[in-house]
Image: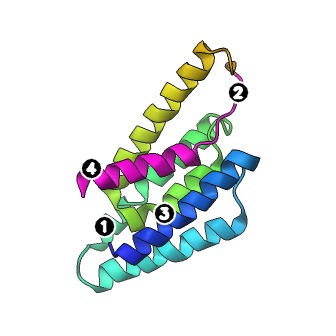
């Protein structure tokens, strides 16, 4: 993927992470920007002959899985988190998104354990997920690219 599109996606994720920490929600303009980036990435990859349409569709699966988790947990994970991951799937690609999603869950679990052990949170405390996803995608990009 192009470095400009990836950089814009990280900038968007950083803005979304800060906003998610402050308000525990995402603004519609953030999702709209993610949609533009995702469509632009998909079109660029497909018309450039770099990726088959099936692989572009596969890049939507991690976000779809997060949306399914949001539904099954009655928004234990927010729908906005899943929508953002779904829309940015074509920007980062299938492998990076899956690895980033799993690492984000691991990081959030470790943070939750630490907060519980220090008695700074209880089992009903909600943590924003986008900051974990942002940092996890950054780590995955550094390690695998």
Q: Is residue 24 visible?
A: no
Label 4 neighbour load within 10 Å: few <14, some 14-19, many 20+:
few
Q: Which secondary structure type mostly characterizes the magenta part of the structure? A: helix
Query: Upstream in the sequence, badge 2 or badge 4?
Result: 2
Of the two numbered discs 2 and 1 on the same chain, state the one appearing first in sequence.
1
CA gap, disc 2 to disc 3?
27 Å
Q: Residue at x 62, y 15 (%)?
A: 118
Judged from this view, the residue extending furthest toward the front is: 118
Measure the alpha-carbon separation of dots 4 and 1. Answer: 25 Å
Q: Nearer the viewer, mark 2 or mark 1?
A: 2
Residue tagged by mark 2?
A: 125
Q: CA distance from mark 4 to mark 3?
A: 16 Å
Mark 2 and mark 4 residues within 8 Å of each other at the beta carbon: no
Q: Is residue 88 above or below residue 65?
A: below
Q: CA distance from mark 2 to mark 1?
A: 39 Å
Residue at mark 1:
54
Disc number for residue 99 = none
CA–CA distance in space, label 2 to label 4? 31 Å
Q: Secondary structure at mark 4?
A: helix
* Chain-order first, disc 4 or disc 1: 1
Residue 20, position as x, y percentages in the image: 67, 50
Task: Specify whether residue 55 is painted magenta.
Answer: no
Q: Give the residue number, with chain letter if any, for mark 4.
A: 143
Quick one: label 1, few (<14), some, or many (20+) residues within 10 Å? few
- Residue 89 in picture, x, y percent from top left: 43, 61
Q: Which residue is drawn at the image coordinates 23% and 82% (left, top)?
A: 49
Q: Specify the farthest residue to the right.
A: 23
Residue nearest the observer in this picture, 84 or 22: 22
Q: Residue at x 44, y 69 (%)?
A: 7
Report crowding for label 2: few under 14, some 14 to 19, many 20 or more residues within 10 A (C-alpha). Answer: few
Please provide the residue range marked out in magenta. Answer: 124-145
């Amino acid at each position: 993927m192009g470095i400009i599109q990836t950089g814009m996606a990280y900038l968007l994720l950083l803005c979304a992470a800060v906003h998610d920490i402050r308000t525990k929600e995402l603004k519609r303009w953030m999702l709209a920007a993610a949609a533009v980036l995702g469509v632009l990435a998909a079109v660029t990859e497909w018309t450039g002959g770099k990726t088959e349409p099936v692989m572009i569709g596969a890049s939507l699966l991690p976000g779809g899985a997060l949306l399914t988790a949001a539904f099954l947990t009655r928004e234990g994970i927010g729908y906005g988190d899943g929508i953002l991951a779904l829309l940015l799937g074509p920007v980062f690609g299938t492998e990076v998104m899956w690895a980033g999603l799993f690492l984000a869950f691991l990081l959030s679990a470790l943070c939750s354990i630490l907060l519980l052990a220090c008695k700074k949170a209880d089992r009903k405390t909600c943590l924003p997920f986008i900051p974990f996803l942002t940092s996890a995608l950054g780590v995955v990009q550094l390690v695998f690219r």
